[in-house]
């Protein structure tokens, strides 16, 4: 990744995407839904992932590419762990583990979103080995 400065208002755009994700996740705190459920099914988060993919080429070669990859990976890994936790709910022994996994994944999503926002506010890339996503 080069240290090319981002074009135009892409930094602001990246903030908007983080805020869309956070809005979905936080709505899980304010409703009976779990954070991860709200994050994965909330329209703001779904729009954010679509925007990530739509603008991905424009952020290449800037530090924002790592943020876009970070956001995309957060969404897809949360979906994977959500699916595993959901599958566990169909076994008697897995019910408590599935519920715990929902909470852990929700906290993990919040951590990743807050960490990303903090690094973005400092103009720093996310520490990732692979950002060509």
Image (cartoon, rainbow, N blue to C red):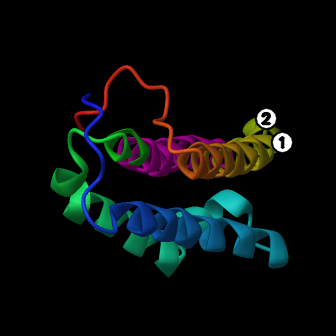
Q: Nearer the viewer, residue 91 or 27?
A: 27
Q: Is residue 62 magenta?
A: no
Q: Which residue is mark 2?
A: 93
Residue lying at 64% horizontally and 74% vertically, measured from the top left:
23
Image quadrant where one finds the N terminus: top left
Say left or right for 57 vs 104. Answer: left
Residue 8, how many percent across, how many down? 27, 66
Circle 2: element type = loop
Residue 99, how many percent across, how many down? 78, 48
Q: Are marks 1 and 2 in contact (CB under 8 Å)?
A: yes
Q: Which residue is mark 1?
A: 96
Which disc is residue 42 wearing?
A: none
Q: Determine the main secondary structure of the stretch shown in magenta.
A: helix
Residue lying at 59% horizontally and 52% vertically, measured from the top left:
121
Say left or right for 131 vs 128. Answer: left
Say left or right for 16 vs 32. Answer: left
Query: In the displayed structure, would residue 8 be above or below residue 76?
Result: below
- Quarter of image, res 93: top right
Q: Which residues are magenta?
A: 68-90
Residue 34, how many percent across, how many down? 74, 63
Residue lying at 61% horizontally and 72% vertically, measured from the top left:
24
Q: Residues within 10 Å of mark 1 (few under 14, many from 20)?
A: few
Q: CA distance from mark 1 to mark 2?
A: 7 Å
């Amino acid at each position: 990744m080069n240290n090319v400065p981002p074009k135009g208002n892409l930094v602001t755009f990246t903030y908007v995407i983080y805020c869309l994700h956070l809005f979905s996740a936080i709505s899980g705190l304010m409703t009976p839904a779990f954070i991860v459920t709200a994050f994965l099914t909330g329209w703001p988060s779904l729009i954010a992932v679509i925007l990530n993919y739509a603008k991905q080429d424009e952020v290449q070669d800037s530090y924002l590419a790592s943020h876009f990859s970070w956001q995309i990976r957060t969404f897809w890994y949360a979906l994977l762990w959500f699916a595993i936790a959901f599958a566990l709910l169909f076994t008697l022994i897995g019910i408590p583990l599935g519920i715990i996994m929902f909470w852990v994944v929700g906290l993990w999503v919040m951590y990743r979103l807050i960490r990303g926002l903090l690094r973005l506010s400092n103009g720093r890339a996310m520490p990732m080995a692979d950002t060509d996503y």
